[in-house]
Image (cartoon, grey):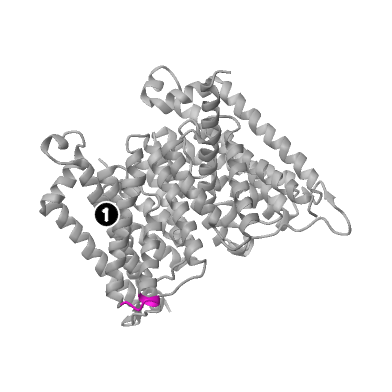
Amino acid sequence: MMGNYPVHLAILVLLWGYIYTSWSIMGRLGLVSFGHGAFMGIGAYTVVMLWNNFGLSPWLGALAALALSAAVAVVIGYPCFRFRIVGHYFALVTLALSEVARLVITAARDTTGGSLGATPVTALNEGRSVAFGALQFSPKWIWLVIVVLVWLGGLWVWRQVDRSMARLALQAISEEEEAAASIGIHVTRAKLRITIVSALMTCVGGILYAQYQLYVNPDTVSGIAISLQMVFGVIAGGMFVMLGPTVGAAFTLLLAEGLRLAFGNRYPALDTTIYGVMLVLFIIYMPKGILGAALDVFKRRPT
Amino acid sequence: MSDVFDIFLLEAVLNGLLLGGLLALLSLGLNLIFGVIDVVWICYAELIMCGMYCVYYLHVQYHWPLLLAMLAAIGVVAFLGYILHQFVIRPVLSAEPINQLLVTGGVLFFLQAAATLVFGIEFRNLGVALPSVHFGEMSFSGARLVAFATALGGVVAIYLLLTRTYLGTAIRAISQDRSIMPLMGVDPAKIFAITSALGGGLAGLAACLLVLQYDVHPAIGLSFGPITFLICVLGGLGNMFGGFIAAFIFAQFIAVGGFFFAVEWGYVIAFIFFIAVMFWRPRGIFSK
């Protein structure tokens, strides 16, 4: 059992690292979304609900979840970008979105179990430890392989976006939207594309989180709290470097686990208290995050 | 049968009106801060939580008279507002606007976690029950009536402060043009500090009214924080009159939606209404 603990931690770091990376793909280009909890919630709940109520395999459920996420991203994103809702306003509109997702899940309690959460019907009975069709595995190493692959996939998308013309276009947009439009950048289309990519990736993260934990709860997969967790994970790690979000995920998880090992459960929320103070200090004095600042120090010293 | 139905609907509408008064007060402080300093305090609801704990501890643990405890809470939260501005907002005033939003989000994390650490996760009840008021077949919670009256009083007081006093004139002037006013002998740093304390004081007042109606616990900010921001945005950030009207619109959605469906659906309808309005008027209903 002890051997499983480091593997479990590694899975969580990589999974959250992937989800934070998904957020940062649009966050680093000035599209600060407080709505990504909605996409994670859609991923987690669509798959679990379709499986529990209709016996639909999570592989097919995932397609439905992705389609729904893309649709929501377009319905919210298109008008936002078309009407130039940026900055504070974009953050607060998307905040409403993540609350809508959480409240809909909570309110539909006859189906979803409301704030008590829900458990996917298990396919792992009678000594079966692997149910491929149900996307349920009990050996942790299978999950480790899956999240490593997905995480690498996320980094690959990050790099593709980073190297694309679209990134340059969006960077221009985030600095001076009118000027970017005047030199022929189709602002709405460029933003919408990146939003859909980011939403779909976050949705995949939600699906994997639900299947790995075998438990979903509206407060832990959707809503403002989880959206803020993503935003701040990325800020802590470093918004503008590829591995920044992963460093952020590792940092927050290890901080929590380290303090738990040191003090046991005597001081609940000590980790988030320290984390909150550090976030404030980071944003004021180290806006590039841990990895960004570390790389700066490294670059300044000639070897 | 339909008579009974109508009277309950009327009760829901009137309760919505009472809720609207409270929401109007909640949004007032946030709008004041935004209008003058151009910063959104994402942690505003957490300041209110601090105020609620303050009233609770002073009254229940230390047996202060309730009114005195409330006055003290208003003072404490006003001071917190001042501290927040001096130590957190001021260093990022010239940074990108989104950083100012995010830094107060960090404060949100901190306050919520620190409250869990210090006070635990128990729901704490003040144990003061105001009698409810009956009117025909309808009944209204006394706490809500008091909240409504106080909220209206607060709104009027702020209005008078802003329009009838020298300080108010200076605050309004700064919010209109930050670069010219220093030349006219108004010190923006001082005005910002005073406004922050004033915004904090309003959060403290809201805390006094909320603690009469709801149990306080560390995550309570998340339950009414989002709605406060949305009201401000709906009315146009910084537009205090717009926020006032928007609070009543939102409250009706919640009360009447909650009457026909479950309470959560009332919120869902209000939030979707908000998103739809944003697309129609991205700078709030009352923008030109």
Q: Nearer the viewer, residue B173 or B232?
A: B173
x and y, in percent, of residue A171 in the image: 46, 25
> In this rendering, would B260 be left or right of B192?
right
Residue marked by disc 1: B197
**x 39%, y 77%: residue:** B60
B214 lies left or right of B288: right
Q: Is residue A1 above or below residue B53?
A: above
Indicate whether A167 appears above or below A125.
above
Which quadrant of the figure contains the N terminus of chain A? bottom right
Q: Is residue B130 above or below residue A272?
A: below
Residue B130 place in picture, x, y as percent:
34, 80
> What's the residue type where badge 1 is placed?
Ala
Q: Is residue B279 visible?
A: no
In the image, residue B209 lies in the stretch drawn in magenta: no
Quarter of the image where one finds residue A125 = bottom right
Range shown magenta: B59-64
Q: Is residue B61 magenta?
A: yes
Residue A93, image x and y in percent? 43, 45
User: Alpha-carbon neighbours of circle 1 within 10 Å: few (<14), some, or many (≥20)?
Assistant: many
Left or right position of B275 against A58:
left
